[in-house]
Image (tube, rainbow, N blue to C red):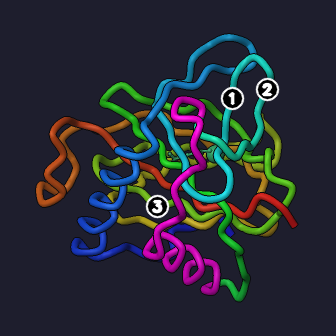
Amino acid sequence: MFEVVQCLTLEEQIALVEVCRTIVKEAPLFQKTMPTGGIFHYLCTSVGHYGWLSDKKGYRYETQHPITKNAFPPIPPLIQDIAVQAVAHYGQTIRPETALINWYDANGNLGLHQDKTEVSRAPVVSISLGDDALFIKGGMQRNDPKEMITLKSGDVLVMGAEHRLAYHGVKKILPGTAPLELAFKQAGRINITVRQVYE
Ligand SMILES: O=C(O)CCC(=O)C(=O)O
Ligand SMILES: [Fe+2]
């Protein structure tokens, strides 16, 4: 279970971009550092009961935005509905507790990793908007063979069951490929991952 299960309509994509613009006004994008001190090459914020944070203290979920110190805004119903439906495609369920919103500019990327800060093993649902990304689809071990797939605007990918802990990453963003109707002011890509954190 590591496939694109749906491509959202242009209208849905436009609505999601609008939702993201509203979210970042309340919960601004910020730059995270790795426990080792390096920086992540994308910006991030979260919605829901928890937000994913990383700094010298390690990877974890917290209930306050690190800059505003406020609770994260609620997960918009549109995002929740897309996640619940995507998982239902496999006869599975998810209780969305957080959605991580990543912004990659034209030079953004994300190294090979597993999503394992969550206690729950419910599937993770990823929604892509804007420029295409070359996405690295790996296996259960870091050195397993990798496949490159292009994630396009509107693609909804589910990572679950035997692939819930599969290695993955974002090799590069392909600037200039976003649908013009999304009216991005600069090249880049939004990725939203909807997650259940606890059992
Ligand atoms: O941007 C993507 O497609 C993947 C994001 C991701 O893997 C993460 O935030 O953990
Ligand atoms: Fe990930």
Question: How many labels sit on residues?
Answer: 3
Q: Which residues are magenta?
A: 66-89
At label 3, the amino acid type is: Ile
* Number of other residues with Cα within 10 Å of mark 3, as a class: few under 14, some 14 to 19, many 20 or more: many
> Could you tell which of marks 2 and 3 lies nearer the N-terminus?
2
Please, what secondary structure does the residue beneath circle 2 have?
Answer: strand
Q: Secondary structure at mark 1?
A: strand
Q: Is residue 152 magenta?
A: no
Dividing the picture into quarters, in which one does residue 106 lie?
top left
Residue that carries the numbered disc 3 in the rendered image? 127
| Frontmost residue, 136 versus 83 | 83
Residue 107 screen position, x and y as percent: 36, 25
Is the CB–ligand 1 distance for label 1 below 8 Å? no
Quarter of the rendering occupied by the C terminus: bottom right
**Amino acid type of disc 1?**
Ser
Q: Quadrant of the N terminus?
A: bottom right
Percent across and percent down for residue 111 are 60, 30
Q: Residue furthest top?
A: 37
Please state which of residues 109 and 97 is positioned toward the viewer in this rendering: 97
Indicate which disc residue 54 carries: 1
